[in-house]
Image (cartoon, rainbow, N blue to C red):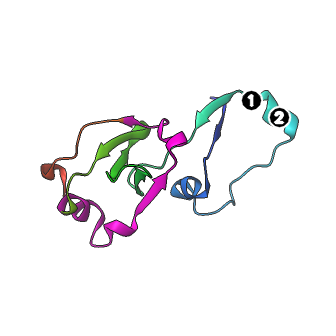
Amino acid sequence: NGKRYVFPNEKVYFSWYADFSTVTVISSEQMASAQLGGNVTYKPGTRMIKIESDPKVYVVSRGGLLRWVPTEAIATGLYGATWNKKIDDVSVSFFTNYRMGTVIDITEVP
């Protein structure tokens, strides 16, 4: 859409890309001429996230929609036995890039 988007950190970047091989380098002038579109959120389905001040864990859905994972059984069903190693803390200052959705129900787990 002709806008530039910011990755808040490397963890968010690597949820979308394996490396930097597809990055195109542009001049400072080109960068300055592109309107800022906002921050990039985690790629849906790659990681779960939480904020540092709240123990709730969320799945990231399309468009930065967060869905609370209320039980360990649901987390295990979605991300396997090592689900607790697939959680990243998001700074409170970037948590506003996400919006809240419905709680995940056990019936949605494969």
Residue 110 image position (x, y, % from top left): 19, 58
Q: Report the amino acid beneath label 2.
A: Gln
Residue positioned 24% across, 37% down in the render: 102
SS at badge 1: loop
Residue 13, image quadrant: bottom right
Where 36 sits versus 51, above or below? above
**Does the residue at mark 1 contact the one at mark 2 (Cβ under 8 Å)?**
yes
Residue positioned 86% across, 39% down in the render: 28
Q: Which residues are magenta?
A: 73-99
SS at badge 2: helix
Where 11 sits versus 81, above or below? above
CA gap, disc 1 and disc 2: 7 Å
Q: Residue furthest left?
A: 107
* Rendered-image quadrant of the N terminus: top right
* Mark drawn on residue 34: 1
Q: Residue furthest front?
A: 53
Residue 95 image position (x, y, % from top left): 47, 41
Question: Which residue corresponds to mark 2?
Answer: 30
Residue 84 image position (x, y, % from top left): 34, 67
* Residue 96 covered by magenta stretch: yes
